[in-house]
Image (cartoon, rainbow, N blue to C red):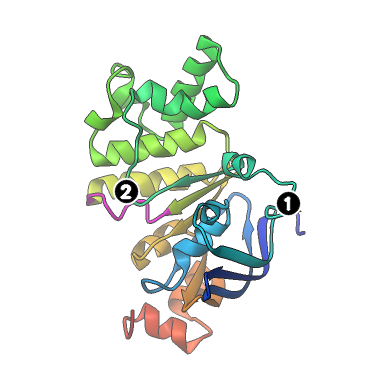
Amino acid sequence: MDDNHIIELNGVNFFYGDFMAISDVTMAFEKNRVTALIGPSGCGKSTLLRLLNRMNDLITGTRIEGEILFDGKDIYAPEVDPVDVRRRIGMVFQKPNPFPKSIFNNITYAPKLAGITGRSDLEYLVEESLKQAVLWDEVKDILDRSAMTLSGGQQQRLCIARALAMKPDVLLMDEPTSALDPISTAKIEELIGELEKNLAIIIVTHNMQQAARVSSKTGFLYLGRLIEYNVTEKIFTNPDMKQTEDYITGRFG
C-alpha cells in the first residue's frame, strides 16, 4: 500500500441481494486530501461511501467482494471490529442528525462510550471539536441547551464536531450541504478546506460546482462503475471519457 494512501479499494463488488450496486471498483484515497464522488442519482456514490466504514453492514442481505484496505488492513477481515472502523472513519450525513440531547452531550456521547470520563477531558474535547467545526463562538454560552434548538447549518456543523471528537483519520460526508441554505453551505465548504490539513475527507455530492470548489481529486461513478478518477481540474476541464464529459456538460444525469 502506498504510504500516501489511507484507503485502497481493490476489485470491489457489492450486492443488495442479487442486485449488483458496485461493480469492480479499484481506487485509492489519499491522506490530507478532499476527494469528491460525483454521478447521477442511483449510480452508487452513497453505497460506495458507506462501504468505507461498514455502514452497509447494517442492511440485511448485502455482501461485498474484493478488499478495502484502511492503513493496509482489510476492514472486512473477520477479526476487525466495525465499531472500531467507524471510530476512525467518521461520517456526516445528508440531513443533520443531532441527538435530542444538549450540545455538550452530543459531542461527548461517543467519547464517554469509548472510556473518556474526566470532566476536564470532556470539556477540552468539546471546546476543541467545536472550534475545529467553527461553531464554538456561536454556542460556547449555550452548551447545556438542546442541540435541536440550533439552525440547520449549525446542527450540521455540530454533527461534524461530533464526528471530529473521536479523532478520526478519515471523514466521510454524504451530500453534507444538500439540506442547507447557501450561507451555511459556504461555511461548511470553508470548514472542509480547513479540515483537510489534518485528515482525509471523502465527499459525495450531486453539486458539481461544489466538487470543483472543495476537492483535489474526483471520481465519476455511473451505474455502479467507476468511469473516471483523476485530478479534479482535469475531470472538469478535459475528461478522458465521453461519459464523464456528457455528465459534466449536462447531457445526462
Residue 80, percent from left and from top? 71, 46
Distance from the alpha carbon under mark 2 to that under mark 1: 32 Å
Q: Amino acid at mark 2?
A: Lys
- Mark 1 is surrounded, within 10 Å at the Cα level, by few (under 14), some (14 to 19) or many (20 or more) other residues, namely few
Residue 216 in sight in this render = no
Dot 2: element: loop
Residue 246, percent from left and from top? 39, 85
Closer to the camera in the image, 251 or 149: 149
- Mark 2 is surrounded, within 10 Å at the Cα level, by few (under 14), some (14 to 19) or many (20 or more) other residues, namely some
Dot 1: element: loop
Closer to the camera in the image, 12 or 15: 15
Residue 153 in sight in this render = yes
Whether 66 is drawn above or below 103: the answer is: below
Closer to the camera in the image, 129 or 194: 129
Residue 73, percent from left and from top? 75, 52
Q: Quadrant of residue 199?
A: top right
Q: Residue at x 25, y 41 (%)?
A: 152
Q: Which residues are magenta?
A: 174-181
Location of the N terminus by quadrant is bottom right
Whether 169 is drawn above or below 64: the answer is: above
Task: Kindly identify which numbered label has been placed on residue 95.
Answer: 2
Looking at the magenta stretch, what is its main secondary structure? Answer: loop
- Residue with the mark numbered 1: 78
| Side of 226 relative to 185 (left or right) | right
Q: Residue furthest top?
A: 119
Q: Residue at x 26, y 52 (%)?
A: 179
Q: Amino acid at mark 1?
A: Pro
Location of the C terminus by quadrant is bottom left
**Mark 2 or mark 1: whose residue is earlier in sequence:** 1
Please say whether residue 178 is one of the residues in the magenta stretch: yes
